[in-house]
Structure formats: C-alpha cells, structure tokens
Amino acid sequence: MLSHNDKVQRLVGGGWVERTYLNALSWIQFRVLSTHKSPDVVRLLRQTRRQRRSLMSAYEIWILHAYAMAQSRRPGAMAEVGVFQGVSAKLLCECKGDKELHLFDTFEGLPANCAKDGNVHRLGQYATSVEGVQAFLDGYENVHIHKGLFPDSAADLEAKQYCFVNLDVDLYGGTLAGLEYFYPKMIPGGVILSHDYSVLAGVRKAFDEFLADKPEPLVELPSTQCVFTKL
C-alpha cells in the first residue's frame, strides 16, 4: 500500500500534496456528514477546521469531537499530546465544559525518528507557534499549554487523572511515552484516542507493544485512528 511506503510518506508529509488530499477528502466527508448528522455540529467542525491548518480529516475530527463530548460527563481532566495549530484542541475546548485541558507540544516540530518509525518524518517537521495556539484558544477557561518534549513537560502534573486523551505525535517514541504516562492516570472508563495508527508504523508498534500485556482491547477505527477504554 502506498500509504505505508516510507518514501511516499516522507515525500507527501507536511507538503501541499498532503494538504490538498486532506482538504479534498474532508470536503467529501463533510458533505456526507451533513446528510445525517447534527447541522450545528457539522458547522462547528467545518468552521474550526477552516480556521487553521489541520492534519485530520473531517471524519477524524468528528470522531474526536464525539468521544470528547461523551467523556465530558466523566470525572477527570482532558489532554492532548501533539497540538500542531490547535484545531483539535479547540474542539476539545468546545466539549470539555469547565474541565481542565492540558495541551502538550514541543512547538518546535517533531524530534528525530527512531528505527521503528522508518525514514518517514523530518526533524522539526510540523513546527508551529505556541503564541498562535494561545491566541486561537483565547477565551476558553482552564486550558493549560505545556511547551517542551513530553513527558518532561508534564513533570508537575503527576497527581492528575484523565477521562480523555488524544495522542497525535506521529512517532514511536512519543506515542509510547504518552501511553506509559497516561495509562495509569486514566479513570475507569477513560478513553485514549490516537491519530495515524493505521498509516504510521511507529505509532502502530507503540500501541501493539504497550497493550500486548494489558486487558484492554484496541479498536481500530475506519479512519487512521485507534482507541481503547481503560478497564
């Protein structure tokens, strides 16, 4: 499959080909969603995705929004690792009510690949501005942005518990770090959702290795995402 080819992924990732593909796919998906989903929700997702660049398709942000809305009724904070320009973070803000939302990103782009990732991403790819994200999320309360390499950037949050976590870090090391950090901090019934499981080898390997001795079954979604619920 071309989507699993390292050379193809490196060529198109982060460039105009990726943007064009995701925008065209999302246009179609929003049209489909508008035929059978809440017009208000579809409008919110479409408008938010247009405001800043997103690496998620319309279906993927629908899934994120749906899980976050459901989990907003549970105790615990929400978190996202891999914020990029803040589109998914803004949707979490729309869902969370008065919950704390903790957002983690280097804001300097991706760290280096490891052997389990393949030669897919470039050092510093997807760099963005923390000030831009702060301005984009201005007006939402209880939003905490943590700049730096995760999990070092979460050093002062050890006592937190979480009901929903979104991982979107592209790499084996960052995904594994997110799973190791958040798994013991999830409430029973807490949800961890991840982007890129079906297309990036490092993300898949991190999940498959981490959950190999855990009781939670992993659900692969029809998008590139996967999800599991803490038992």
Image (cartoon, helix red, strand yellow):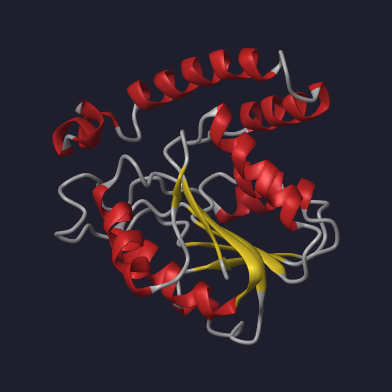
Can residue 49 be seen here? The reply is yes
Task: Say which quadrant the N terminus sits in.
Answer: top left
- Residue at 31 percent across and 60 percent down: it is 208
Residue 72 rendering spot, x and y as whole percentages: 77, 57
Q: Is residue 56 left or right of residue 108?
A: right
Asked if residue 205 is positioned above or below residue 48 in the image, the reply reads: below
Q: Is residue 59 left or right of residue 101?
A: left
How many discs mark residues in the rendered view? 0
Asked if residue 31 is positioned above or below residue 104 in the image, the reply reads: above
Asked if residue 2 is positioned above or below residue 231 in the image, the reply reads: above
Residue 135 rendering spot, x and y as whole percentages: 70, 48
Residue 89 rendering spot, x and y as whole percentages: 64, 49
- Residue at 83 percent across and 51 percent down: it is 139
Asked if residue 117 is positioned above or below residue 181 in the image, the reply reads: above
Q: Is residue 208 left or right of residue 24?
A: left
Task: Say which quadrant the C terminus sits in.
Answer: bottom right
Residue 176: quarter of image: bottom left
Residue 122 rendering spot, x and y as whole percentages: 25, 47
Q: Is residue 59 left or right of residue 71?
A: left
- Residue at 34 percent across and 69 percent down: it is 210
- Residue at 50 percent across and 52 percent down: it is 227
Can residue 102 be seen here? The reply is no
